[in-house]
Image (cartoon, rainbow, N blue to C red):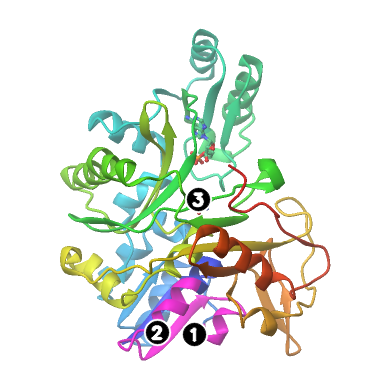
Amino acid sequence: MKVLVVGSGGREHAICWKLAQSPKVTALYCAPGNAGIAQVAKCVNVKATDVDGMVRWAKDNAMDFVVVAPDDPLALGLVDALEAAGIPTFGPRANAAIIEASKAFSKELMKKYHIPTAKYETFTELDKALSYIEAQGAPIVVKADGLALGKGVVVAATVDEAKTAAREMMEDKKFGESGSTVVIEECMTGPEVTVLAFADGEHVRPMPASQDHKRAYDGNQGPNTGGMGAISPPPQYTPDIAQRCMDEIFQPTIRALKAEGRPFHGVIYFGLMLTPDGPRVVEYNARFGDPECQAVLSLLEGDLMDIFTACREGTLDQADLRWKDSAACCLVLASGGYPLDYKKGYPISGLEEAGKFAVVFHAGTAEKDGQIVTNGGRVLGVTALGGTLDQAIANAYAAAKPISFTDMHFRTDIGRAF
Ligand code: AMP
Ligand code: GLY
């Protein structure tokens, strides 16, 4: 099969790396890809959000299957457009991807189907939002409705902070139209875990749980990022909790989406908080998380191409999903200054040496004059396995040692910050 993967980060490198191991995949392409992805797939110069351009390229080049990995093209309906053009595609259609694209939609869905989540109200008028904040008191959480690059959430410790956040979103339009509707919700407490699950419209099969590290600096300090590292599985996610999540959250969500006429085919991301009252949904995403994907796919034994096909065709219950009995750790090496200002174009050394001990997924790299250089905020995801979580963490840090580039930044407490 000729397969195209849409996207360009560490997640897409992990997907391409795993698909390249499938005997069914005879030619692999990635649009737009990066310098690491280029080692396992042919990179194609089409932007992930260029829906017409992507459909045209996939048709002209006779793709047998397309995998849409990032949130923006999913929300724009790239899966719908490719399927309409007769190209089998992995990923939710826009009417199901809305669980990520609209927080107001996903909160309403959870309320209607009794899926445990923080209590909330949705507002389109600033006055009403401010009175509600006043009445509820702090701590309280203010969220922009739409996609805001992970920055549209303020966990406010005081009423004033919450009011400022609501004003910035609704009046100053800090996140553009994403903030015309805000969701204001109860502040939950407890460890956060991610569960990625395959879904085929009807069946849902969770992958091993994982845990992201969203803050830029050690000790969960500093600004939010796309994720500075991930481990799998996190020790807090016990078999009892996993069973509760399956019964109270995963299956009810997939059933709810089906009942609403929005069957979810693809990977659904459950962002969970393990509160003293049980597991609750913090957020849904309509795709693999990144860097979680890098850790979790490293544990997959089965053929990812078969699993993607089963998700599309509704046969996931029969798919061969096996996982290594190991733990995984993905350590992100980022550009100095990320997630704020940072420079690109620095040469990276030590990649070959590191690759002997771990899989080094590329998140933001490019090739310049035969040399691999930095080309994004998150640059690499050094991903190692181990018999225990401690071993996996130690292996990832040891493997990363030889890698260096100017102003390289990473957290030293991945897997130990909770
Ligand atoms: P989200 O974009 O919805 O995942 O939110 C980003 C982060 O804000 C989450 O990973 C949580 O750490 C935090 N957060 C979101 N909603 C809540 C909530 N209701 N209570 C406590 N923390 C929250
Ligand atoms: N790592 C969090 C996300 O992909 O949304």
Q: Which residue is mark 2?
A: 21
Q: Quadrant of residue 215?
A: top right
Q: Is residue 351 magenta?
A: no
Ligand 2 within 8 Å of disc 2? The answer is no
Front-lying residue, 154 or 20:
20
- The residue tagged 1 is 41
Looking at the image, residue 35 sits to the left or right of residue 312; the answer is right
Among numbered discs 1 and 3, the one appearing first in the sequence: 1
Tell us which disc is closer to us: 3 or 2: 3
Question: Is disc 2 surrounded by few (<14), some (14 to 19) or many (20+) residues within 10 Å?
Answer: some
The amino acid at mark 2 is: Gln
Badge 1, how many Cα within 10 Å: few under 14, some, many 20+? many
Give amino acid for label 3.
Gln
Dividing the image into 4 quarters, which one contains the C terminus?
top right
Nearest-to-viewer mark from 1 and 3: 3
Above/below status of 13 relative to 44: above
Residues drawn in magenta: 14-43
What SS does tag 3 mark?
strand
Name the residue rendered at 71%, 55% in the picture.
412
Q: Residue 137 appears at what percent x and percent y?
A: 54, 12
Residue 135: image location, x then y, percent: 50, 8
Kindly tell me whether mark 3's CB lies below 8 Å from ligand 2. Answer: no
Disc 1 vs disc 2: which is toward the camera?
2
Residue under numbered circle 3: 211
Which residue is found at the position 62% from the left and 45% from the top? Answer: 417
The image shows residue 78, relative to residue 157, as above or below, that is below
Lower position in the chain sequence, tag 1 or tag 2: 2
Residue 29 falls within the magenta-colored stretch? yes
Q: Measured from the top left, where is residue 305 in percent x and y?
A: 31, 77
